[in-house]
Image (cartoon, coloured by chain):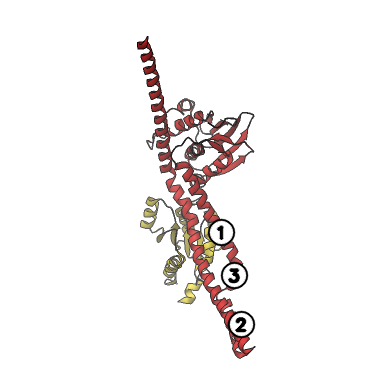
Chain colours: A red, B yellow
Amino acid sequence: MPKRKNSISKKVENEKSRHLDAIEHTHTLVQAEKLAALGTIAAGVSHEINNPLSFLLSNIESLETYMKTFRILIDRYQQYVDTVKLQGLSLLSQDMVREISAIRDKSEVDFMLSDYESLLKDSLEGVFRIKEIISGLQTFSRPTGKEIEAVDVNHCIEVALRVVSNELKYKCLLSKELGQVPEVNVNAGLLLQVFINILVNAAKSIHEKGTIKVSTYCDFRDVHIKIIDSGCGISEDDQKKLFMPFFSRNHETGKMGLGLSVSYGIIKEMGGRIEVQSSLGVGSAFTISIPHERRKS
Amino acid sequence: MTSNIKKIRVLYVDDELNVLRSYQRALRGEDFEISFAQSGAEALDLIRKMPTFQVLVTDFRMPGMNGIELIREAKKALPQLECAILSGFADEATIQNALAQSTIRYFWLKPIGNDQLRQNLRELVSRVGSMV
C-alpha cells in the first residue's frame, strides 16, 4: 500500500512539474513575442517621438526669443516709469516711448503676444503625445506579470493605436467605433500585446493603401473587439493553421510566426477567444471576445 | 545680393501641422518668401498654381506620397528646383540613391534647432541666389 501511495505522490509531483514547465514555457513565448513585436515597431515609435520632439525643440527656442524680447520691453517700461516718477514727462521720457515703440515694431511683439498661447498649446500637445507613447511602451514591455486589474478596453485600444500609429498612418485610413463597454478583469500589458500584434499584422497585410476599422461592443457575457482590415486576406487553408505556433505567412522575411499563437494563448487564458473571418484579396476580420463577468483571481 | 535672395521662393512640406507651425514661427523674418503645405498633393497643387518656387524642402514619410516621390513630381514642372529632405525617419537606401542622382541636394535629420534650420535653408537658398 505505501508503495502505491509513493507512486501516486510521484505522479502528482511530475504533473506539477510539467504544469510549472508549461507556465514557464508560455511566459518565455510571450516575452519572445514581445521582443519580436518591439523590434517591428521600434523604428515607427522613434519616428512618433521624433515628430513632437522636432516641434517642441523649435517652439522652446522660439519661446526663448519671445521671452528675451518681453524681458527687454519690461526693462524699458520699468526705466520709463522710474524716469517719469523722478522727472515727470520730459523729452527723455518721450524718447523712451519712441524707443519702446521701435522695439515693439522691430521684434514683432504683437505677433509674439498673439502666438504664444498657440505655441504653448502645441508644445503641451507634443509632451502629452510623447507621454502616451512612453506609457504605452511601459505597459507593453514590463515583464509579464500576473496582476489582474479592471481594464478599460477602449483605452487599451487607443494606447495600442498610438504605439503602432506609425505602422498604420501612411497606408491605412483608420476608423473607430468604440462603444460603451464594461471593464474586463485581465492583465493590461498582455491585452495590449494582443491588440498591438493584431494591428501590426493588419497593417502588414495591406501592401499599398487600405482601411482598418476598429470597433468595440458587448453582449451580456463578453466584450468584443473587432479589427477589420482591407488587406490581402488569408486563404482557408492558412486560416486553419493561423493560431498554431511557428506558423507564418511572412515567407519572404522568414520571420517566425509566434504572434498569433501567443495572442490566442493569452486570450484563452483570459477565458476568451479569437475568431477570424477572411477572404483572399478582400481582407480579414479578427474578433477578440473577453468575458466581462470574470472575477479577479 | 540681399534683393536677389529676397525674391527666392521656398516651399516647405510636412504632414505634421504642429511641425509646420513651429517652423513658420522659426522662419519669420527670413530673407526669402516661404510657403507651407501639409501633403505632397497640396504642395503639387501650389506649384501648379504658382510655378515660381525655387527651393523645396520636404519631410520624407508622409501619407499619400513620400518626400522623394514629391520631389520627382515637382521637378517635372520645375526642373531647376533645389531640394532637400528634412526628416526624422527615412529609408537609407532611397536617400543615398536620391543624393547620388542629385534628386536632392541635402538630407537633414530632425529634430533640428532653429539656428541650424535657418542656416541650412539660407545655404540652400544661396545656391539659387548665386544663380539669379
Check if mark 3 and mark 2 are on a common chain: yes
Q: Which residue is mark 1?
A: A122
Amino acid type shown at disc 1: Asp
Disc 2 crowd, CA 10 A, few/some/many (<14, 14-19, 20+): some
Q: Report how far apart the C-alphas of labels 3 and 2 lie in the structure.
A: 25 Å
Q: Residues within 10 Å of mark 1 (few under 14, many from 20)?
A: many
* Nearer mark to the viewer, of 1 and 2: 2
Image mark count: 3
Where A152 sits versus A17, above or below? below
Amino acid type of the residue that numbered disc 2 sits on in the rendered structure = Val
Q: Which residue is mark 2?
A: A81
Q: Nearer the viewer, residue A188 or B36?
A: A188
The residue shown at (47%, 35%) is A146
Instruction: Name which residue type carries label 3.
Output: Phe
Q: Is residue B132 above or below residue B96?
A: below
Q: Secondary structure at mark 3?
A: helix
Label 3 resides on the chain identified as: A
Q: Is residue A191 above or below residue A21?
A: below
The quadrant where residue A34 appears:
top left
Chain that bears disc 1: A
Reading the chain from its start, which is encountered first: label 3 or label 2? 2
Give the mark, 1 or 2, whose residue is nearer the N terminus: 2
Marks 1 and 3, how far apart at CA: 16 Å
| Residue B63 seen in the figure | no
Whether residue B126 is visible to the viewer of this picture, yes or no, is: yes
Q: Residue under circle 3?
A: A111
Which one is earlier in the sequence, the residue at label 1 or at label 3? 3
* Real-space Cα separation, disc 1 to disc 2, in angstroms: 35 Å
Which residue in the rendered view is the most extreme toward the front? A2
Per the rendering, the mark at residue B111 is none
x, y percentage for residue A97?
61, 83
Label 2 marks which chain's residue? A
